[in-house]
Structures are given as structure tokens and as C-alpha cells.
Amino acid sequence: MFNTGMQSDTNVEVHKYYGGTIIGAAILALVMQAFLHKFGHWSEMIELPLLVTIYFGVSRRNPVSGLFLGAAIGILQDALSHDNPIGLYGIAKTLVGYLASSVGAKIDTEHPISRFGLVFVLFHFHQAVLAITQRALLSRPAPIFNLHLFLSSIVSAGFAVLLFALLDRLRKPH
Amino acid sequence: MEISSRHRPLALLVFVVAAQVLLIAFQVRHTDRGRRDVPLVRYWAASLITPIERAGTWTLSKIGGVWTGYVAVRSTRDENVRLRTENDQLKLRNRELETQATEAERLVALTNFRQAHPESPMIGAQVIGSSAPMMGAQIIGASADPSSHTMFINRGERDHIRRNMAVITPDGIVGKIVEVFPSTSQVLLISDKESGVGALFADSRTHGVVKGNGDPEPRMDYIVNDEKVQIGEEIITSGEDRIFPKGLLVGTVMDAKAATPFQLIRVKPAARLDRLEDVLVLLTMQELNLKKAEEAPAGVPATGTSSSQPAASSQGAKPAVPQP
């Protein structure tokens, strides 16, 4: 179960979860994200919906389910936002979910370091897609990369290692 | 189109992302440099369709240009022929109308003249009016002899035309009837060398005789050298010839030269003798007298005909009774 190197598709394990776990975790992440905003701007450095999308994407290792999960979480996140058009986060998380599932099917992402690195990369990918979409469709200036985003990606990646370990407990036993 | 199972997730990804992009496009409005914002999806649709429409319009216009510029030349040529024909017809029609308008102007001038001279006895009341008999006539020909200044009119004996009747136009006198045929008459113009008209200067009231000499311009004769003659002075009929009523315009003085025994005065006829078309025939009171004069022995002066004596010589003649 503990693999750090590249694995073929057939050798990578696909995890299963109890019914409602994914949906519940996604809703909880959205609620918690909204709840954390009350505690200051530091909470903005961690984006729980993104972490949930990445986790279940790499765990399920199915690009189709990954992109739909990302789309659903992103659209819900847009729906809960104030002025974001529906689809802004949806596009970004759709691509992240697809990418995470595709990467999870190629390599084992159980190791904390690989999880940290994966979240770090996908965080910036998510931010890049978000910024490009905002610039192209909304004509809004949005940063693709800056120090704040870099620190956010570090914090999110570190928090993701802990969160993913917690979420691992929701897997069905083999 | 069937997508392989390997590429199916990727195709699904493209579909889902595109659907969300479209979803955003329906929500977001596009603002371009302060212009009125429009939904982004409409802006995209216009941006997508407009170049295609422009290309289509350009292609159609080029095809249409080829058609109208080359293929349809045949119809243009046919149309050109048709327009040329129509233009010719319109030219003819225009010429016809101009002729009618000119004729109408002449008739108006004749009518005005008759109304201005109600006292003048004229025949042909059925032609011009009822109060003053006046007969309109048209010039139908001229003399074959170039030296003879005569014209033929379309009125003759059947129209009660008689010899020595005056022939005039509203511009001035023309001549007199010298021959009468059943349906035509011959007019001796005042420019003929056989013609003579009793006349006087309108300003000085000096009497003389306007005599033809075969040239287009007759001469005013029997004016002594002491008499001052102004160029352009009007010459009118004196009525002494018993053919032309008094006061009709004969012409104007072109030039005057001292000569022996009288001045040599050229007269420009008021009537355009070289372009006559319609004339008026007046009844004169001299017809019987003239007939008598013609029957008289040679050497007796006859007013209104070529004579070596001034027309004033008949001034004392007893006025004749008008011919009924």
C-alpha cells in the first residue's frame, strides 16, 4: 500500500468509500470553507473544496468521476460565492479533478511527500486556470502567481497531508 | 462519430469545461470601451458569425459583380438598344411638341395683333375672330425665279382672297396679293423690285416709299438729303397706298447715305421675310381702285405697286368703298 515510485495502472490500488462519504465530505468542505472565513483572512490560504477534489480524485483514480466531482464542487462553490458566475470555480476544479485522477492512476499518491507535492502543484494549476478564466471571460485582473499564493500553496499542501490522512480513515476496508 | 474508450474521459472533460464556459458566457456581460454591454455569449456569437457573414457577403458581392459586369452584359446591351429607341422616339416627340408650341405662340401673336387692331377690316372671321375679318394663311411655296421675291399661300379665290390685299405678320408687313388662284395666291414681298409701300418715319413723320430692289433689304426712297435720318428709326406704313393700313411696322433704318437726288436708305424689314410660315391677309379698301389703276394707261402711278412716283401721289385719291 505504501508506494513512492511510479506504478502502472494495473498496479495502482483503487480505494472505495462508504456511501455518501464523498458527497458528505464535499458539502462539509464547502460549509467549513464558508465557516472559516469568519476567523480571518488566514483561512483563505486553505481551500478545503480544492483539497477534497484532489483527494477523491487521486483516490478514485477515475478521470470521469474526478472531473464530475470537481465540476460539482466547483459549481457549488460558485453558487455559494457572492459575485462569481456559475462555472468559474467549476472549470478550474473540473480540470483539477480530471488531472488528479489521471495522475493518481499513474503514480501512487499515498506518501505524504508525494501528496504534498501533488497538492502544491495542483494548487497552482487551479489558481492558474482560475486566473486565466477570470481574465479571459470576466476581464478581471487575477494573479497567476505571487508570494501570497506561494505561501497559500505551502500551507494548503501541508494541511492537505493532514487532511488526507484523516480522510483515509473513511475508506472501505479491503 | 465514435470516440474510443481511451479518449472518452478527455472528450468528456472538454465537453464539461465547454459547457461551463458557455454557462459563464450566458451570465457575464461584455463591455467594450464604454459601449453598451451585451451578454458575453451574444458577443461571442456575433464575433463568430460576423466574419462568416462578411465572407459570405463578400463572396456573393463578387459573384454578383461578375454576373452583372460580365454575364449580364447581354441584357444590358438589349436594354441599351431599347433605351436608344425610346430616346429617339422621345426626341421626335419633343421636336413635335416644340413645333406645336411654336405654332401656338404664333397663333397667340396673331390673335393679339387682331385684338390690338380691331378697327382693321380683315377677312376670315371664322379663322381668327368674329369682330374683325382676318384670314390666316400658310406659306406653301416660293417663286422658282431667284430674282423674284414672291411666295405662295394656301388661300385663294375660294377663300375670298382678292388681288392687292395686304399680307402681314404681327412683326410687320410682308407684301400684297398679286395673283389669286382657286385655292392659292401669290404674294409679292416688299423686298421684290416690283414692290412699293407708302411709308413714313415713325419719329419725324417724313413720308417716303419703301421700294424693293431685289435685295433682302428694301430701300426708303424719296427722302431728301437735308432730312436727318437716325439709324434704327422705325418706318411704318402711311396708308397712302390704300393697301396697308396706316401705322403698321415696315422695318427699321439700317443705314442712310447721301445720294443724288435722294438719300440712299436701306431698310431692315420688320417681318422676317426669309422665314415666313404663317401670315395674315387683310382686306384693303383699294381693290377696286387698283383694278381701275391696272386698267388705266401706262404711266399712271398705282399705289402699292412698283412705281417711279411716290405713293404719296395717290394720297388725294378718293377712298374706295370696301368690297362686300
Image (cartoon, coloured by chain):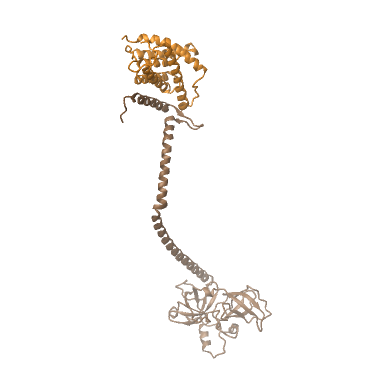
Horizontally, residue A16 falls left or right of residue B298, namely left
Camera-nearest residue between B37 and B91:
B37
Camera-nearest residue between A171 and B58:
A171
Where is residue B284 drawn, in percent x and y? 52, 79
Horizontally, residue A41 falls left or right of residue A72, namely right
Where is residue B106 drawn, in percent x and y? 50, 69
Q: Is residue B160 visible?
A: no
Camera-nearest residue between A102 and B221:
A102
Q: Residue at x 41, y 60 (%)?
A: B81
- Which one of the lettered chains is coloured brown? B
Quadrant the N terminus of chain B occupies? top left
Horizontally, residue B148 falls left or right of residue B43, namely right
Q: Is residue B107 visible?
A: yes
Where is residue B269 drawn, in percent x and y? 57, 75
Vertical comparison of B74 with B125: above or below:
above
Vertical comparison of A74 with B225: above or below:
above
Q: Residue at x 46, y 66 (%)?
A: B100
Vertical comparison of A24 with B301: above or below:
above
Where is residue A30 drawn, in percent x and y? 41, 15
Vertical comparison of B316 with B17: above or below:
below
Q: Colour of chain A?
A: orange
The total number of labels drawn is: 0
Q: Residue at x 47, y 23 (%)?
A: A131
